[in-house]
Amino acid sequence: MKDDFLRPPATPGDWLADVLRLIGVLGTIAAAIWLTPTDAGIAALALPALMLPRMLGLAAWFDITACATVLVAAWSNVFDLYRTVTGWDLVLHFLCTGVLAVIAAVILTRTGVVALVASVDDSGPSRRRRTPVTLVPLVALAISAVWEMIEWLGWRYLSDDIFVTYEDTIGDMVLGGVGGIAAGILLALVPVGRRARVRTAATAPLT
């Protein structure tokens, strides 16, 4: 993970993903200076999700998708788009939960907990294609539950400006589960690892 995180960008996609990460960091600093503590906290909460795709050495296309989705999700809260744009929260719960489910699946595979990602891309144990389709939606539902708990805690202890209702919670979790289904299908069909890593490992001399 350290080598992947410190790896210099090599393609336009790598550069774009790093620019999005920089925007996330600078946005958090700006929120801390000029906006409310709640807004700064929301922006800061997105930072780990921005860094994980680089730390895991994921493909540039997914890195860009993940960073863009997480930034939009965080700053939509700051600019109150979830209240003002009908259905916007459902769209972002679908997209963001799906992205986070893919990242979680890679971590679970790399740590040997369960094989959800193809070993050819992520150096994990072999798995059948139906495995991510079955299990990744469950991971997404777990992420959705934690997400809603964080929202409730924020509403209960930090600010009543955070929008929390029973209907909103259930709707968000449903769309998060659907996003998990999409993520599982994606992992069953499309590699998310960096092929450069695979070639390097495949051509390394045997010892």
Image (spheres, rainbow, N blue to C red):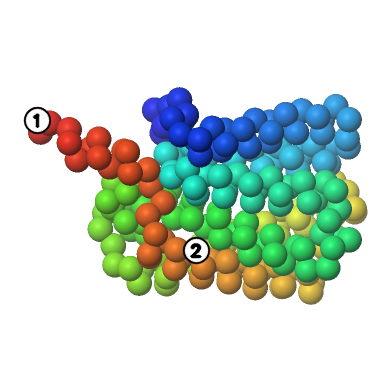
> Label 2's element?
helix
How many C-alpha atoms fall within 10 Å of the one at disc 1: few (<14), some, or many (≥20)? few
| Quadrant that contains the C terminus | top left
Residue under label 2: 183
- Position of 175 with respect to 112 (left or right) is right
Q: Amino acid at mark 2?
A: Ala
Q: Is residue 153 visible?
A: yes
Residue located at (85% from left, 36% from top): 37
How many C-alpha atoms fall within 10 Å of the one at disc 2: few (<14), some, or many (≥20)? many
Q: Is residue 53 visible?
A: no
Q: Residue 97, located in which quarter of the rendered image?
A: bottom right
Of circles 2 and 1, which is in front?
2
Q: Which comes sooner in the sequence, label 2 or label 1?
A: 2
Residue in the foreground of this view, choosing between 138 and 21: 21
Q: In the current view of this chain or complex, which residue is farthest to the left?
A: 207
| Quadrant that contains the N terminus | top left
Residue under label 1: 207
Q: Is residue 105 above or below residue 75?
A: below
In whole angstroms, how far apart are the C-alphas of marks 2 and 1?
Answer: 37 Å
Q: Amino acid at mark 1?
A: Thr
Q: Is residue 99 above or below residue 41?
A: below
Residue located at (79% from left, 36% from top): 40
Q: Residue 179, located in which quarter of the rendered image?
A: bottom right
Q: Which mark is residue 51?
A: none
- Position of 195 with respect to 22 (left or right) is left
Residue located at (43% from left, 27% from top): 7
What percent of the width, then of the height, locates residue 142?
57, 62
Q: In the current view of this chain or complex, which residue is farthest to the front?
A: 12
Residue located at (39% from left, 59% from top): 190
**Tag 2 and tag 1, C-beta contact below 8 Å:** no
